[in-house]
Amino acid sequence: MSTKILIVDDDPNICELLRLYFENEGYEVKTASDGAEGVSYFKMYEPDLVLLDIMLPKKDGWQVCREIREISSKPVIMVTAKGDVFDKVLGLELGADDFIVKPFDMKEVSARIKAVLRRYSAHDNQMEDEVIKFENIEISLQKYELKLRGKPVDIPPKELELLYFLASNFNRVFTRDQLLDKVWGFDYLGDSRTVDVHVKRLREKLEGVSDKWTLKTVWGVGYKFELLQ
């Protein structure tokens, strides 16, 4: 089956250019011209990847990304004309997998799509059936599910992936750059505050759950999932 790409952009010329290019590369392509249509098409079309412009009518790219992440972990590449670090930080916090800045080169877009799809496929296949368990916590990548004291807890995909990675490498310290590379999966240029934001949100969810483990800050280095004696 062909890989399906959903392009969400309000510029019909860009949509047509991307559609023709990627259909020529063997992809199945659907286009949407506004954010509301993008969300609707995502649910109907079930694409393997979304190329999502930020500046959209009806619903902007941020809101579209939020709604996609509520129901799916499929890759989202956001397109911005700004190239602003703030855009990248916010996009990463919402669960975007990569960024492309307009004006873009078609070969670069193609390379980034292939790289994100490879990472997603590899991530999707690795140890998917393994559930990490410690006292009062279970983390499943296959189900994208976090259970605390036996009860499911709502958690965005990137937060769960970060927690899973740290817990599966317990007692090992990782720098913010290492976590961006391992969890977000690409060389991130700019501010690494997104890791701090995700850790903060995880701590709010995990507070008081157990005294046998903790999500610890190693000052001057990074973070680790520490098992306590």
Image (cartoon, rainbow, N blue to C red):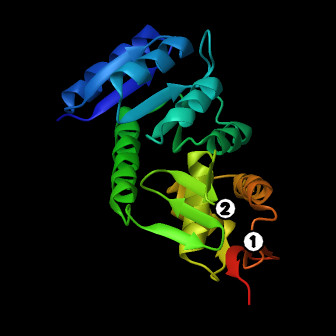
Whether residue 188 is visible to the viewer of this picture, yes or no, is no
Specify few, some or many for label 2: CA neighbours under 10 Å numbering under 14, 14-19, or 20 or more: few
What label does residue 160 carry, if any? none
User: Which residue is pictured at 42% across the width and 23% down the height?
Assistant: 43
Front residue (pair 207, 65):
207
Whether residue 40 is visible to the viewer of this picture, yes or no, is yes
* Residue type marked 1: Ser
Quadrant of residue 66 within the rendered picture: top right
Q: Position of residue 213 (x, y in %)?
A: 71, 77
Write down the residue under mark 2.
149
Q: Position of residue 7 (x, y in %)?
A: 41, 23
Query: Marks 2 and 1: which is nearer the front?
Result: 2
What label does residue 210 carry, if any? 1
Could you give the CA–CA distance between mark 2 and mark 1, rounded to whole angstroms? 9 Å
Q: Position of residue 132 (x, y in %)?
A: 52, 69
Mark with earlier residue (2, 1): 2
Q: Position of residue 97 (x, y in %)?
A: 52, 45
From the viewer's perspective, is residue 84 above or below residue 60?
Answer: below
* Residue type marked 2: Arg
SS assignment at label 2: loop
Left or right for 27, reference 145: left
User: Which residue is pictured at 38% across the width and 16% down the height?
Assistant: 31
Front residue (pair 177, 161):
161
Specify few, some or many for label 1: CA neighbours under 10 Å numbering under 14, 14-19, or 20 or more: some
